[in-house]
Amino acid sequence: MIAAPAESWGRDGGATHPGYAEPVRIDVVTIFPEFFAVLDVSLLGKARQSGALDIRVHDLREFTHDRHRTVDDTPSGGGAGMVMKPEPWGEALDAILTDGSIVIFPTPAGELFTQSRARDLSTREHLVFCCGRYEGIDQRVIDHTRSRAEVLELSLGDYVLNGGEVAAMAMIEAAGRLVPGVVGNPESLVEESHEDGLLEYPSYTKPAVWRGLETPAVLLSGNHAAIAAWRREQQYERTKRMRPELLPPAGDAL
Ligand code: SAM
């Protein structure tokens, strides 16, 4: 096992999470470590404090050796923009990878990130996120990493962001909240959109009437079977309206 470099930004070490043998370790490599200050907020911040998540953010420029801390160069073959150089990435991954690492390259050219992929990532012992910038990372970094670790190229959606940071942050939050102990009530994770193939039903709270709009009467009835049936029907109706492609072909059960 290779240790993370001393320059790691964020929580160091990794206190053991009560009830779990090891925290899930997440390393992020970026040229903008400050993007990840939000990891100290809310449930993920608490999870870092409790030791359920051991998140370390690394500045890619710490792995350069020139005066300007250069991480990019012109594209081979010409063209617009700049490409991230392989050398700093190679050194960063040499320092960070462990035997159990899965390395994620966020990219709009990757496989679509889904709830089931988030659930998969939440069960891994060590996630490494490599945040691209400019036109992306030299392809050899991805190919070389694949020769020594499991690699995923994951897209947040069919649009282009300026960098991998926002995508990595979204993936860390989606996977991190599924790690046992991160969300207080695990039952709240089960009845959610994309967990059973359907979108979630609409939610209401008090007051029963707000600005003339009433909470559906069934939710105030106390009839649990009727509430469950209404919610299921709403799930189908909402999925059909918002995301019909998620519904199974007629005749197939979910
Ligand atoms: N030239 C690349 C292409 O057309 O596929 C886009 C590069 S983009 C401007 C810079 C970086 O942002 C990428 O290397 C990737 O890390 C990140 N990125 C952009 N859009 C993304 C998306 N939809 N999902 C995940 N990462 C994304």
Image (cartoon, helix red, strand yellow):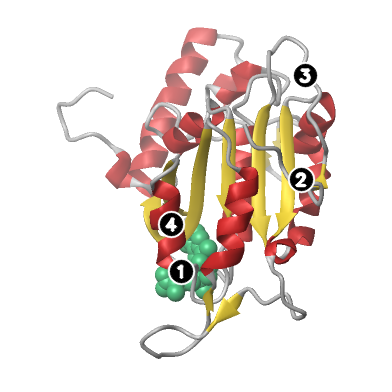
Amino acid type at circle 2 is Leu
Q: What residue is rendered at 36% in x and 47% in y?
A: 243
Identify the element where label 3 is drawn.
loop
Placement of 230 over or under 88, stated as above or below: above
Q: Sequence order check: which comes first, mark 4 or mark 2? A: 2
Placement of 121 over or under 58, stated as above or below: above
Identify the element where label 4 is drawn.
helix
Spatial separation of the CA atoms under disc 1 and disc 2: 28 Å
Identify the element where label 1 is drawn.
loop
Q: Residue furthest left?
A: 251
- Write down the residue under mark 2: 39
Amino acid type at circle 1 is Asp
Q: Sequence order check: which comes first, mark 1 or mark 2? A: 2
Viewer-side residue, 148 vs 45: 148
Q: What residue is rendered at 55% in x and 58% in y?
A: 90
Q: Sequence order check: which comes first, mark 1 or mark 3? A: 3
- Write down the residue under mark 3: 16
- Write down the residue under mark 1: 138
Q: Residues within 10 Å of mark 2 (few under 14, many from 20)?
A: some
- Write down the residue under mark 4: 142
- Comparing labels 3 and 4, the label whose residue is closer to the camera: 4
